[in-house]
Image (cartoon, rainbow, N blue to C red):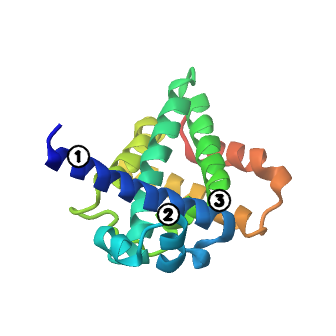
Amino acid sequence: MSVQERKERERAGREGLIVATARELAEAQGWDAVTTRRLAERIEYSQPVLYSHFRGKREIIGAVALEGAAEMAAVVRAAAASANNPRERVTTLARTYLDFAERNPAVYDAMFQLDGGLAFAQEDTPEPLKDAFAALLESLGEVAGDGVHPGLFTEVFWASLHGLATLTRAGRLLPEDAAQRVELLVDRLAVV
């Protein structure tokens, strides 16, 4: 291994450590607790080392969002692949999405609530974000219905899931009705 390859691997390792530590801290204490000073202390590097990887908290949030998008795409695809028919696939996708949002609140916030400096629905949208949408589209496109653009249907279904996730986290919806909400969403929106 060349010196350059070793340095690149070490740099990637530090970057991964920064993102993992920010994510861990945000999940435990919220994003307000994530500061460059606190991260530097936790990873035992100086703040200038942190700034050599990320210009600030906004870029760290963006890195967490990209990592979360890749994870969400993987779990949604895996869950959808286990389903036997379109209805089961869409129901499983919805439950998996909502479960991901519940289990990873700080990551979900980084992806959809906070400014991570990432472009959505643009030419320069990062690949992990495009892939997360594609993971939804793969299952939802088939149940959009005649004459309905699959991408538009996916946006509406995704917006509904996001609303459910956000309102549930805020304590605005009764948790015991979660399964019924998913069934209602699938029954009313999807053509299965």
Q: Quadrant of residue 63?
A: bottom left
Q: Residue at x 64, y 50 (%)?
A: 98
**Rendered position, 23 above or below 113:** above
- Image quarter in which the N terminus is found: top left
Amino acid type, mark 2: Ile
Q: Residue at x 37, y 44 (%)?
A: 134
**Rendered position, 84 above or below 157:** above
Please state the horizontal and vertical placement of residue 89, each as a whole percent of the image: 56, 31
Q: Which residue is mark 2?
A: 43
Could you tell which of marks 1 and 2 lies nearer the N-terminus?
1
Q: Residues within 10 Å of mark 1 (few under 14, many from 20)?
A: few
- Residue 165 - label: 3
Please state the horizontal and vertical placement of residue 47, each as a whole percent of the image: 40, 77
Q: Residues within 10 Å of mark 2 (few under 14, many from 20)?
A: some
Q: Which residue is mark 1?
A: 6
Q: CA distance from mark 2 to mark 3?
A: 32 Å
Instruction: Determine the secondary structure under disc 3.
Output: helix
- Image quarter in which the C terminus is found: top right
